[in-house]
Image (tube, rainbow, N blue to C red):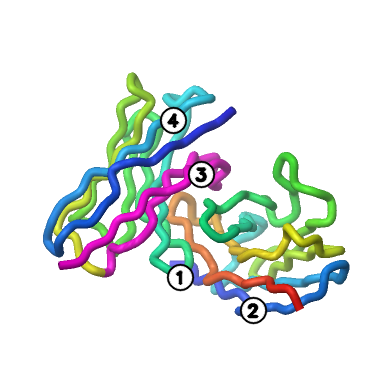
Amino acid sequence: EVQLVESGGGLVQPGGSLRLSCAASGFTFSSYSMNWVRQAPGKGLEWVSYISSSSSTIYYADSVKGRFTISRDNAKNSLYLQMNSLRAEDTAVYYCARDLRLLDYWGQGTLVTVSS
Amino acid sequence: EIVMTQSPATLSVSPGERATLSCRASQSVSSNLAWYQQKPGQAPRLLIYGASTRATGIPARFSGSGSGTEFTLTISSLQSEDFAVYYCQQYNNWPLYTFGQGTKLEIK
């Protein structure tokens, strides 16, 4: 069974940093590209970032470019999102999602709150 | 950026009736369109991909149609568990995915 479990969310002040993790199991993690998608409270879904299986190709949404960094460790079956210079508008539930040229499996999400 | 627009924002339907949800793309996405269902406090679940192919385990009462810029999700006979928010998503511009703003399907 495919499982994706996010962690690392919490309360952080504006301008602060946070690192999210996503632990994958139930599939060959190193064979799949992965994504981060976020959802602000009461709002819709926003794609954040993509990383290919070998980490050779990475994309970011314009809203996070230059502040967020996606990475992965295939030996640990883990995906990461380093978030710097956080803003109030980054407050959201962050989901990791497996990529099959669409998003076929999602984790349950981790909440990031940016507030003073 | 491809903008996805869903209508209506909220749809009130009685159990057992048919629900029809719409999604429009700002430019052609061919058949590279997916639908997701999201219930409160849960992650989105893939329902339909390729505009009309049901994902694994999705009941036959869910069907998708359309191509190019106009798409429809139809739920033929609403069950209590179908009341949720539904999102369309284009992947024609993979992996720069964009989602519609969602349609909330509520009990009438």
Residue A95 shown in magenta: yes
Where disc 2 sits, the SS reads strand
Marks 1 and 2 on same chain: no
Numbered mark located on residue B10 in the image: 2
Residue A106: give its label: 3
Q: Position of residue B99 (x, y in %)?
A: 51, 64
In which quadrant will I find the C terminus of chain B?
bottom right
Q: Report how far apart the C-alphas of labels 1 and 2 lie in the structure.
A: 14 Å
| Residue at (33, 22) in percent of width and height | A76
User: Badge 4: few (under 14), some or many (20 or more) residues near its Cα, within 10 Å?
Assistant: many
Which amino acid does the dot numbered 2 rest on? Answer: Thr
From the top left corner, tell me how far across and down residue B48 is, in percent: 69, 52
Give the label on residue A42, or none: 1
Q: Which residues, given as a range, are shown in magenta?
A: A89-116
Same subunit, tags 4 and 1: yes
Are the residues under marks 3 and 2 on the same chain?
no
Quick check: B103 above or below B81?
A: below
Above/below status of B27 relative to A66 = below
Q: Say yes or no: labels 1 and 3 on the same chain.
A: yes
Q: CA distance from mark 1 to mark 3?
A: 18 Å
Q: In this rendered view, identify the residue nearer to me: B3 or B37.
A: B37
Q: Is residue A97 magenta?
A: yes
Which badge, 1 or 3, comes first in the chain's sequence?
1
Report the chain holding disc 2. B
Residue A64, quarter of picture = bottom left
Say which of B64 and B36 sits in front: B36
Q: Chain of mark 1?
A: A
CA distance for labels 4 and 1: 27 Å
Q: Are marks 4 and 1 in contact (CB under 8 Å)?
A: no
Circle 4 sits in a helix, a strand or a loop, which is it?
strand
Q: Residue furthest left?
A: A15
